[in-house]
Image (cartoon, helix red, strand yellow):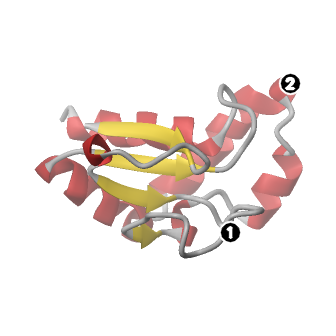
Amino acid sequence: MVKIKRVYERPQESDGVRFLVERLWPRGMKKEELKIDSWVKDVAPSTDLRRWFGHDPLKWDEFQKRYLAELAGNASAWMPILEAAQKGEVTLLYSAHDTEHNSAIVLKSFLDQRLSK
């Protein structure tokens, strides 16, 4: 099972393997404070896509399409997460303030589709 959680929320045992899925380190977060198993920068949207989107909800639909296209061409980035999810619980950690329009939501959906096959 794949879950998502903001990096600022407390870790829980039920999180399973915790992956930071951001290209940039979260603001205000010290490395020793953030309990992660792996930081997978390359699974995050490209810098150009992230800047273009700018967390603008009006660009959400197009952002999802573009990000899914990036993911489809970058299996080496998301495969470790998928493999961990096939063995147990996985939590994708993101730092965006917007809990409804962020890349972790798209990534979770992408991974869920592959897990259901």
In the image, residue 35 above or below residue 54: below
> Where residue 109 sits: x, y (%)?
43, 33
Q: Are marks 2 and 1 in contact (CB under 8 Å)?
A: no
> Where residue 22 sits: x, y (%)?
62, 60
Relative depth, front residue between 111 and 98? 98
Determine the image quadrant of residue 112: top left
- Check residue 58 in the rendering and tell me which mark sits there, or answer none: 2
Answer with mark 2 or mark 1, whichever residue precedes in sequence: 1
- Outermost residue, bottom side: 32
> Where residue 23 sits: x, y (%)?
65, 67
- Check residue 25 in the rendering and tell me which mark sits there, or answer none: 1
Q: CA distance from mark 2 to mark 1?
A: 25 Å
Q: Is residue 68 left or right of residue 60?
A: left
Name which residue lies at 30% across and 65% down: 80
> Where residue 8 sits: x, y (%)?
61, 48
Q: Is residue 33 left or right of residue 96?
A: left
